[in-house]
Amino acid sequence: RADVVLIDSLVSRPDLARAAVELLARRGRERRPYAESVARAPGQDVQVRVLGAFAAIAFLLAGIGLHGLLAFNVSQSAREIGVRMALGAERRTILTMVMRRGLQLTLAGVLAGSVLALAAGRWLQALLAGVSPTDLASFGGAVLLAFAITPLGSLLPALKAVRVNPLLVMRAE
């Protein structure tokens, strides 16, 4: 019903119709679809999707690796954690200690990964779709994503560390 009223008013007032067409034409020139704004070679869409899948797998593996490193670290330092808890350390302190270790490992990984990504960027430049190898937004997004998965990879080992029983750890020695 609203469409009929709009068309009826545009037909009865040609000046409104002309203004509407000019407005739509101007907006069409301003907003080009992404596919038109980036010149791509044939088959490059597939390459972009494959690289995106590899990036997602890399971040998943980074989270799993962080979890593994922290789980190993917690199991190796169970005696230290038990002594801290026996001396009165709060669970929050132990949790913070393990989560901080996860952030330290992530920071080391981000620094090493950034250096390697800058070095490899020149070789992969042909596969980058309209993005420079040193694109700040891409690097920033990757760093933010790495730090976003840090709590996920650190949480289970941190909770395991909090559940350490000081008496059992001391008795095992």
Image: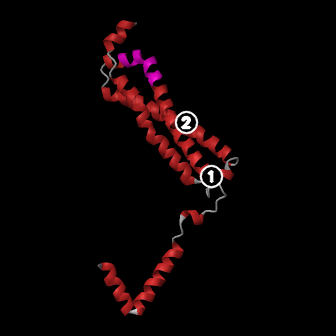
Q: Is residue 30 left or right of residue 75?
A: right
Judged from this view, the residue extending furthest toward the right is 123
Of the pair 32 and 136, the residue shown nearer to us: 32
Quadrant (top left, top right, bottom left, bottom right) of the N terminus: bottom left
Q: Which residue is mark 2?
A: 109
Where does the image place residue 151, in percent across and percent down from the top left? 41, 36
The residue sitting at 53% across, 66% down in the picture is: 33
Q: Residue 146, percent across and down?
A: 49, 41
Look at label 1 and name its amino acid: Thr
When the figure is inspected, residue 139 is found, relative to residue 102, above or below; the finding is below
Q: Relative to 77, say whether 42 is above or below.
A: below
For mark 1, what is the residue? 134
Count of all numbered marks drawn on residues in the image: 2
**Residue 79 belongs to the span the image colors magenta:** yes
Left or right placement of residue 41 versus residue 99 in this view? right
What is the quadrant of the C terminus in the image? top left
Mark 2 → mark 1, Cα distance in angstroms: 18 Å
Q: Is residue 128 above or below residue 4?
A: above
Residue type at numbered disc 2: Gly
Q: Quadrant of residue 154?
A: top left
CB atoms of marks 2 and 1 within 8 Å: no
Part of the protein shown in magenta = 71-82
Please name the residue shown 44% across and 42% down the image: 148
117 part of magenta stretch: no
> Image quadrant of residue 92?
top left
Of the residues under marks 2 and 1, which one precedes in the sequence? 2
Residue 90: percent from left, percent from top = 30, 25
